[in-house]
């Protein structure tokens, strides 16, 4: 959406998908009807799945009717039901919604800046760096889960700094950033495997489980950092978004329009790393959401660029659905949510390869 004067001469040439709504100040606001509709539908799906997820148990006989779920929030149920719903199930649902939005926005930033659909934190290496920080905290420093949270934040930010410094020669160009990130990621994955191989079996199994996403370990307090980071960085991204859109035309074109590309890239990368680092710190690495969500959002909205709000809605929807699958597919055994998102990512990449091969053959 954007604001235009009431008698703007270009109003009549916009495609039918756009509508103009007047305001009290006499300004007409341009609304992309398809994007708003798609986002609203995704939000409704996310809300419905979230409520349904609160009623699903991981063992036989633990499912609750929606009336009892509502009663747990209104104080009309027993302390046991309140503890099951509010303290046990709500944290993972809330982190899935907020965390999915964070990961999607992070992927949207990387893909816009690099102008490459493979530009996402798990491909470039930021997720691997966060995992390295957590493994060092858990296996080398013996700091446990609390240390893993701090270690993943430090690891993600340090990896982002290293990749940026290695890729910045002559300006941070999109392809160079991805290639450098893939190289750094490969080295970090090898180092992570070395740490796991050297650790005691019991410690290695706990760390390996954390490396796939540990939603079953989440507590109510884990919602706070993810929600706070989303609330702080989303407005910052909204301020940077107009300049970020210039990268869709290429850095040279952006510079010709007066955009300080070096400064803007650094700010955008800090925001993107912040989004992915907080999710990784709280729940462990969650793969492929940042890769898939922006591209799915762009295709659903049929937008020439990546729509940020729609991408966030796709990320929230995908992660909350993945959490339901991880919790119920092999119940009472709970899969790490990263296993489900990795499977979704594999299907997505396979479909993308098929589509691209058909285009080449034509």
Image: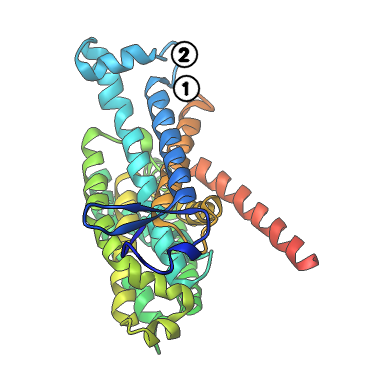
Q: How many marks?
A: 2
Residue under label 2, please give it: 60
Q: Which mark is residue 332?
A: 1
Dot 2 surroundings within 10 Å: few (below 14), some, or many (20 or more)?
A: few
Residue at the image position 69 percent from the left and 62 percent from the top = 356
Q: Of residues 137 and 103, which is closer to you in this image?
A: 103
Helix, strand or loop status at disc 2: loop
Q: Is residue 171 above or below residue 146?
A: below
Contact flag, marks 1 and 2 (Cβ < 8 Å):
yes
Q: Position of residue 140 (x, y in %)?
A: 30, 56
User: Is tag 1's residue or tag 2's residue first in the polypeptide sequence?
Assistant: 2
Quadrant showing the C terminus: bottom right
Instruction: Residue 186 in the image: state x and y as whole percent.
Output: 49, 66
Report whether 341 appears left or right of 267.
right
Q: Secondary structure at mark 1?
A: loop
Quarter of the image with the N terminus is bottom left
């Amino acid at each position: 959406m954007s604001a235009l004067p009431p008698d703007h001469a270009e109003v009549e040439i916009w495609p039918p998908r756009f509508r103009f709504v007047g305001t009290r100040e006499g300004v007409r606001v341009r609304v992309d009807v398809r994007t708003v509709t798609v986002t609203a539908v995704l939000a409704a799906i996310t809300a419905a799945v979230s409520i349904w997820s609160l009623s699903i148990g991981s063992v036989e006989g633990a499912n609750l009717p929606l009336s009892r779920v509502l009663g747990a929030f209104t104080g009309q149920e027993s302390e046991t039901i309140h503890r099951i719903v509010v303290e046990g199930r709500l944290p993972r649902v809330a982190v899935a919604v907020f965390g999915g939005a964070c990961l999607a926005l992070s992927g949207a930033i990387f893909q816009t800046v690099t102008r490459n659909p493979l530009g996402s934190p798990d491909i470039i290496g930021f997720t691997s760096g966060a995992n390295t920080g957590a493994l060092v905290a858990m296996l080398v420093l013996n700091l446990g889960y609390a240390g893993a949270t701090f270690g993943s934040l430090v690891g993600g930010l340090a990896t982002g700094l290293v990749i940026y410094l290695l890729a910045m020669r002559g300006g941070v160009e999109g392809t160079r950033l991805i290639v450098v990130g893939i190289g750094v990621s490969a080295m970090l994955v090898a180092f992570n495997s070395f740490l796991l191989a050297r650790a005691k079996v019991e410690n290695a199994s706990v760390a390996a489980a954390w490396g796939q996403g540990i939603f079953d370990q989440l507590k109510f307090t884990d919602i706070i950092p993810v929600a706070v980071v989303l609330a702080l960085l989303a407005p910052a991204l909204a301020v940077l978004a107009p300049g970020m859109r210039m990268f869709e035309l290429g850095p040279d074109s952006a510079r010709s329009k007066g955009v300080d590309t070096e400064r803007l890239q650094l700010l955008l990368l800090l925001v993107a790393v912040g989004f992915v680092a907080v999710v990784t710190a709280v729940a462990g690495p969650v793969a492929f959401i940042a890769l898939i969500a922006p591209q799915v959002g762009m295709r659903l909205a049929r937008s020439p660029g990546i729509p940020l709000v729609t991408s966030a809605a796709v990320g929230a929807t995908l992660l909350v659905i993945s959490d339901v699958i991880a919790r119920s597919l092999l119940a009472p055994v709970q899969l790490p949510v990263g296993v489900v998102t990795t499977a979704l990512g594999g299907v997505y990449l396979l479909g993308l390869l098929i589509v691209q091969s058909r285009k080449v053959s034509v």
